[in-house]
């Protein structure tokens, strides 16, 4: 490892070359912001994105495999940046979250009173199962979110190479990339935006810079075709979150998109059978059309999701962004990609590309996400307790219902649930907001109510 | 039906007033689709100052100076707007000040355009005064 004193001189000069490995949101965001900023300060940058997949084809091989929900906060930040999300990228605009428990449900409306959350396809969409002509039309118009961002990066001046990077080596302190055809031209900076579900991440780990990829767990995503009319009639503009105490399942949600619904499940050893059991659960089955039978074959994937922090996600001339570095716990992975990509782009263009530059200017953003996840873990552990405790579950449900009926009292409990499950706010903010006397009293009253009702039932 | 279900933000119809001059507002707006016009009323006469299009924003001045709206904004045709409230906006800027770069860029452009217009008016008025003096 070279001397940090020397590294302070590592800067991107006019004509510098940047290689971005991965054309997902993190790679595209980095490219957009780096090229924009370079233009603003009159610097000419030669940036190439290496992505061997096409995000316009159907099925998991062309998809970046996530629930595809863009939080309201990110939708707004992107709009401020000039990246406006519209159909056919947006598959459904969301303004409501429904929390469904065994004891009933509560519908929470967006505090901003607008359709602010976007559901999108990360690839070209599920393997097509359109059955009617009405469904075939709109589906053919869908555009992948990742493809759209890649187009934005290309418009800013990024070159896109359909090449897989097989290996990375350091030669005289400079990273050198290798494809199947051999060594690629020398670059000044390598940006690791390959995600944690690709083999390229291994090449970074074997580079000898001390980089270790974050710890992961597996999620299960399935796309189920029920037809656009059914999606509109049964799910509308709402995401359904299920806290139904299914064994081994931490979290389950149904997200409407076009003529499909995406089922996202998180837990220990979630398999296709767990999804089938979920769909066969009376509360879930009740949500689907009576005539609808669960098909044996549906588009599904089991991606790894980041639940920890990477070690040393930067070195001289190398920076890791997106979920190869830090991501928000269970939620808003695209939002984390945006934050890390932007911080890395600002550092590289305005300050330098040495280890010390990234440590001082980029790493605080990653640390902030990691610190926030600590509070996220506490909040999700608490949600788990609520999910397994009928009295607490009922009390929380009734508190939220009461707030929805009496808006003049303020949406303390509802906004906590909203922000937590939509990924709209930082977990630290939500955690601090939970320590509120009025909220505590409201929940306590509902706990006593639930106990009293149970006691009366027993008495009779 | 689908067109509304997959469109973000709030919908406004042609001629709808988004906000009135001198009203109090704590929101800024970004145009997701369509056009809006910025109108100023003086002595009963309405003057269109500018027409904004997709990707443009307005209402941001009140977020920074807490003053009443400086002009009226109306929808020109069907418009979809994304509304951002002051608290959320300031939170975002405090976390990432570079988020304001594009806003500064747009605001600088507006000041340049206004400067150019003012200069043109001054030249025009000077010309009229000179003509008037020659005539006298």
Image (spheres, rainbow, N blue to C red):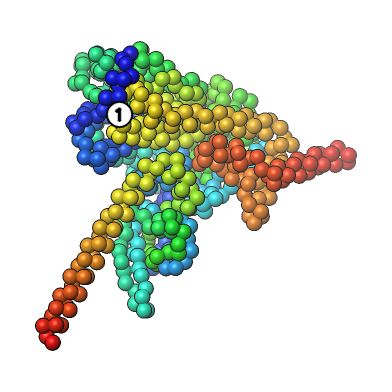
Near-viewer residue (A415 or A137): A415
Quarter of the image with the N terminus of chain A in it: top left
For residue A124, side relative to residue A48 (left or right): right
Residue B25 percent across, percent down from the top left: 47, 61
Figure quadrant of residue A321: top left
Count of number-bearing discs: 1
In the picture of the structure, the residue carrying the numbered disc 1 is A352
Q: Say which of B7 and B83 sits in front.
A: B83
Work out whether residue A137 or residue A82 is closer to the camera in this orientation and state it: A82
Instruction: Tell me if residue A50 comes above or below residue A171 in the rendering.
Output: below
Q: Is residue A243 visible?
A: yes
| Residue A286 relative to residue A458: left or right | left
Vertical order, A437 against A328 (above or below): below
Q: Position of residue A165 (x, y in %)?
A: 28, 20
- Which residue is depicted at the point 56% across and 32% down? A376
Residue furthest out toward the bottom:
B136
Residue that extends furthest to the left in the rendered view of this protein? B134
Q: Looking at the picture, how far across and down is residue A148, in whole percent?
A: 32, 40
Which chain does tag 1 point to? A
| Crowd band around label 1 with a 10 angstrom C-alpha radius: few (<14), some (14–19), many (20+) | many
* Residue found 46% across the figure and 59% down from its top: B66
> Furthest residue to the right?
A459
Image location (x, y in percent) of residue A11 = 26, 28
Where disc 1 sits, the SS reads loop
Q: Which quarter of the rendering shows the C terminus of chain A?
A: top right
Work out whether residue A203 can be spotted. no
């Amino acid at each position: 490892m070279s001397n940090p004193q020397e590294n302070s001189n590592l800067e991107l000069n006019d004509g510098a070359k940047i290689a971005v490995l991965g054309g997902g949101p993190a790679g595209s965001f980095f490219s957009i912001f780096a090229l924009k900023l370079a233009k603003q300060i009159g610097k000419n940058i030669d940036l190439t994105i290496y992505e061997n997949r096409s995000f316009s084809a159907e099925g998991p091989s062309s998809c970046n495999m996530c629930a595809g929900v863009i939080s309201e906060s990110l939708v707004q930040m992107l709009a401020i940046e000039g990246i406006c999300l519209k159909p056919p990228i947006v598959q459904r605009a969301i303004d409501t979250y429904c929390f469904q428990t065994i004891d009933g449900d509560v519908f929470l409306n967006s505090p901003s009173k607008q359709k602010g959350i976007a559901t999108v396809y990360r690839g070209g969409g599920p393997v097509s199962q359109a059955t009617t002509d009405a469904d075939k039309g709109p589906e053919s118009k869908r555009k992948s979110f990742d493809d759209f961002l890649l187009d934005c990066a290309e418009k800013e001046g990024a070159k896109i190479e359909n090449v897989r990077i097989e290996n990375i080596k350091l030669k005289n302190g400079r990273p050198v990339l290798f494809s199947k055809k051999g060594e690629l031209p020398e670059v000044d900076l390598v940006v690791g935006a390959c995600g944690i579900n690709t083999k390229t991440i291994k090449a970074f780990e074997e580079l000898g810079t001390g980089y270790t990829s974050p710890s992961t767990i597996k999620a299960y995503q399935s796309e189920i075709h029920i037809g656009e009319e059914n999606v509109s009639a049964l799910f509308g503009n709402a995401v359904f979150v299920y806290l139904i105490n299914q064994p081994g399942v931490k979290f389950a949600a149904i997200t409407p998109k076009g003529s499909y619904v995406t089922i996202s499940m998180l837990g220990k050893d979630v398999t296709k059978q767990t999804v089938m059991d979920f769909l066969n659960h009376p509360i879930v089955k009740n949500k689907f059309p009576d005539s609808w039978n669960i098909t044996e074959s549906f588009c599904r994937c089991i991606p790894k999701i980041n639940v920890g922090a990477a070690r040393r996600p930067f070195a001289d001339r190398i920076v890791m962004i997106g979920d190869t570095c830090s991501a928000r716990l269970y939620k808003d992975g695209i939002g984390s990609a945006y934050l890390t990509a932007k911080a890395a782009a600002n550092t590289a263009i305005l300050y330098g590309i040495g280890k010390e530059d990234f440590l001082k200017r980029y790493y605080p953003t990653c640390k902030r996400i990691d610190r926030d996840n600590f509070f996220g873990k506490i909040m999700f552990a608490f949600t788990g307790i609520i999910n397994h405790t009928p009295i607490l579950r009922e009390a929380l449900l009734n508190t939220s219902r009461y707030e929805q009926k009496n808006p003049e009292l303020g949406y303390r409990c509802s906004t906590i649930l909203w922000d937590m499950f939509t990924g709209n706010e930082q977990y630290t903010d939500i955690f601090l907001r939970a320590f509120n006397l009025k909220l505590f009293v409201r929940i306590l009253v509902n706990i006593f109510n639930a106990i009293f009702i149970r006691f009366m039932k027993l008495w009779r | 039906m689908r067109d509304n279900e997959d469109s973000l933000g709030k919908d406004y119809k042609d001629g709808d007033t988004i906000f009135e001059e001198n009203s109090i507002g704590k929101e800024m707006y970004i145009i997701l689709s369509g056009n809006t016009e910025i109108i100023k009323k003086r002595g009963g006469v309405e003057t269109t100052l500018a027409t904004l299009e997709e990707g443009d924003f307005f209402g941001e001045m009140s977020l920074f100076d807490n003053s009443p709206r400086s002009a009226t904004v109306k929808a020109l045709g069907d418009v979809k707007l994304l509304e951002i409230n002051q608290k959320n906006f300031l939170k975002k800027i405090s976390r990432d000040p570079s988020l304001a770069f594009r806003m500064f860029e747009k605001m600088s452009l507006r000041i340049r355009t206004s400067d150019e217009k003012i200069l043109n008016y001054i030249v025009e008025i000077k010309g009229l005064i000179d003509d008037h003096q020659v005539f006298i």
